[in-house]
Amino acid sequence: MSALQTGSTTAADGTPPDLARRFDDTIARDQRIEPRDWMPEGYRRTLIRQVAQHAHSEIIGMQPEGEWITRAPSLRRKAILFAKVQDEAGHGLYLYSAAETLGADRADLTERLIEGRQKYSSIFNYPTVSFADVGVIGWFVDGAAICNQVPLCRSSYGPYARAMVRICKEESFHQRQGYELLMTMMRGTDAQREMVQDAVNRWWWPSLMMFGPPDDSSPNSAQSMAWKIKRHSNDELRRRFVDMTVPQAEKLGVTLPDPELRWNEELGRHDFGTPDWDELMRVIKGDGPCNAERIERRRTAHEEGAWVREAAAAHAAKQADRKKNGAVA
Amino acid sequence: MSDDHVYLSLAEGHEDGDARWAFGTGFEDPLYGVSTAVPEDVDPADLAACCLALGDDALVTAQRLAEWTTRAPELEEEVALANIGLDLLGQARLLYARCGQVDGTGRGEDAYAYFRDADDFRSVRLAELPNGDFAFSMARLLVLSAWRLAHFERLAASRDPVLAAVAAKGVKELTYHRQYAAEWVVRLGDGTAESHRRMQAGLDRVMPYVGELFAAYDAAEAVLAVLRQVGEAATLSLPAVPEAAAGSGREGEHTEHLAVLLADLQSVARAHPEATW
Amino acid sequence: MSDTQAKKGGWPLYEVFVRGKRGLNHVHVGSLHAADDRMALTHARDLYTRRNEGVSIWVVRSEHIAASTRDEKDPFFDPSADKVYRHPTFYDIPDDVPHI
């Protein structure tokens, strides 16, 4: 029974029961699984998929904001945005690194991304149309990411959890820079205030969709929660995000575009409308406003960089040969 | 001991935190405790011109590096190129700030970056050329950082304490930029047949603009020594340095590429001249 | 592995160790890809210490690390010392994935 509760699916595959039991015990005691430990294949596969999607999201997520680095309207904002997008590359690398401890290979994961066989967060398939979008992405998208990711610092898989600690530390600053930009813009001209409200209108619903489909249609969630790869359900995290964001919106002086949004005294939380799940499914399936161009950019960079990567590998091989021959002589 | 202990220990001593997040290098204020008064034996106009030219070089180079974002040949290079771009952006901001203090206008950094036209820029033309391929970008970065490093080493002893402090900080950064570029030029030159061809082509394209740099500050000896050493390790032939070609970015004479670069850089700021960001 | 990797122009995996400050040990912080040791150090500096987190860096090719297993009696691992990361063994990932 305890094996079932911790999601063990190992009984039928001939795994020695003591290994399975030890894995289950480790999870039950809230300790970490480390790379060399025995783990069920399902656990490994699920983790690789989740960590790779997360890594891809960081890398594709560089694009919507990266568009604005060259155009940022002050040198201070330019430095902030440049550093933030750089952090996203770094976060992608931390996560690919965690995936590689599970036996995945980054080159293969990259292939899967650019062939459209592995997904990334749907939010990055929406366009950025004004500089206010940079602020709103920081506020909403990084805010949602923090809701998602802080619990993952306690993920059962050690390298993933440790990568998340580092990422969360860096991302809390990302959210703050976004909110600070919006506060500054709201104190500026009428045109700036309109830009902010317009960006809020466009990004609010896609941000709510970032938490994934509702719990009753999220088939893999229960197993992931049993394995402590995931620590809270999609709906729970979505609610937490709404509760966190509403007072921030009031303080900022913007309106969140949901007529059903109101405080529920009885439940002690906000009621809010239902995102357009059909839209989410379309975007996930590749039919969002920017899916094709995001993948195309990544593919082009990867393919156009091939000669550079090959040259470095060839040079390293030559150097190694010279060292060997030199040592012999 | 918790599993996260490693990261807690890494973060020790950085609790002061909030101000640290937007930068690729160093969190110390390089101007802390430095007097901003212009020494009596320094000509403010000369000092302003020097800061402006070096600030423009840094801004234009940083802008070209920023254009590599999401287009770099490998993810690790995304991080590296951004670090270099952030260093240069930081240098530009400090130099513009100094310029505004001494040129009599009291302008802030953004006035220099966003509200001057191409013919008011004093950057060298090498910096504004489009990125081309990675080989050209590395050849250019090598030349620009070797030249700038030689110049900054000299300026670290400037009689102006602010410029001296900015240069002293920059020397550390530029040493790394030069090293990064040199390693890539060697790898590409001594890599595959294709990379060798591209690297030689990149170097050939850069050389005609080198004379303009040396006219601005004669670091020919130091720069050419670096190029010879790197070129030899990279199996590249070093083109002769042509006489400084007609025209100079330092005089405000630019290629058509600078106006295009600035149109992008300044587009949002100029669309909202009354705005605060 | 190295052969196919070289053909694709892929760079080998390195493990990175950073000394956070004087008086502390180097600790493992993650991994990265690089063509050679020199590049690995450069990348490690840019990636793992870009917020001034370190005073010294070690890098080592992942395939050069020998590691004990969790339990030397563990029947699944013999001999008792093995490479830490058996990449690039790839595990199939189904396509019907919910986004993160």
Image: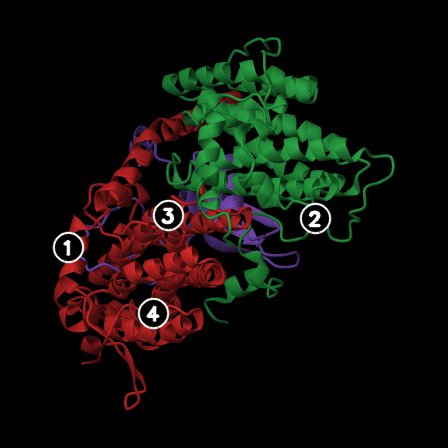
Q: In the rendering, at what x and y percent does residue A224 appear?
A: 24, 68
Q: Which residue is mark 4?
A: A255
Q: CA distance from mark 3 to mark 1?
A: 22 Å
Chain B takes which shade in the image?
green
Disc 2 and disc 1 on one polypeptide chain = no
Asked whether C55 or C46 is in front, the reply is C46
Find disc 2 in the rendering and name its residue: B30
Say which residue appears at 34% left-offset and 69% top-offset.
A255
- Chain identifier for the purple-coloured part of the image: C
Q: Earlier in the sequence, mark 3 or mark 4?
A: 3
Q: Is residue A102 visible?
A: yes
Residue type indicated by callout 4: Thr
- Give the labeled residue for mark 1: A282
- Type of amino acid at the residue the image marks with label 2: Pro
Chain A rendered in what hue? red
In the rendered image, residue A238, in percent from the top left (x then y), is placed at 28, 71
Q: Looking at the image, which is closer to me, B155 or A301?
A: B155
